[in-house]
Image (cartoon, helix red, strand yellow):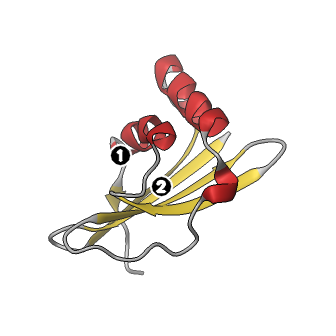
Amino acid sequence: MKVQLQQSGGFMGALQECSLDTDQLEADEVQAIQESVTNTNWTEAESHPSAIRDGYQYHVRVEDQEQTYTAAYTDQTLPESLKPLVGVLKKYLKPKSLR
């Protein structure tokens, strides 16, 4: 499974991202991601959330063998079911290159 997270906003407006294959992660991280993907209602996901002052926006993309899921949220709209996935991926965020 391939997972991507892009985080933007916050006080500094920084843009950070990561793109990983779950084969690169620890077993407990993979389990948290798989449970998040399974427990999330992807049909209710926002495509373009409204910006919030000093808050973060998250763009999540998950590709597995059967389907691709894409969604965007803010701090306030991020569903509980995706918080474990975002929590794991935040550890791997790096500033996005402007090239």
Q: Which label was assigned to residue 49?
A: none
Q: Is residue 71 left or right of residue 63?
A: left
User: Of the residues under marks 1 and 2, which one precedes in the sequence?
Assistant: 2
Q: Is residue 31 left or right of residue 12?
A: right
Q: Which residue is mark 2?
A: 5
User: Relative to residue 25, is residue 15 depicted above or below?
Assistant: below
Residue 15's quadrant in the figure? bottom left
| Residue farthest toward the left in the current orientation of the protein | 11
Q: Position of residue 33 (x, y in %)?
A: 55, 33
| Residue 23 in sight here | no
Going by the numbered disc 2, the residue's amino acid type is Leu
Query: Quadrant where the N terminus lies?
Result: top right
What residue is drawn where x is 61% and y is 34%? 39
What residue is drawn where x is 33% and y is 41%? 91
Going by the numbered disc 1, the residue's amino acid type is Lys
Could you say whether the residue bearing mark 1 is in a helix, strand or loop? helix
User: Relative to residue 27, is residue 57 depicted above or below?
Assistant: below
Mark 2, other Cα within 10 Å: few <14 / some 14–19 / many ≥20? many
Q: Position of residue 53 (x, y in %)?
A: 21, 74
Q: Position of residue 23 (x, y in %)?
A: 61, 30
User: Relative to residue 80, is residue 48 depicted above or below?
Assistant: below
What residue is drawn where x is 42% and y is 57%? 77
| Residue farthest toward the bottom in the current orientation of the protein | 99
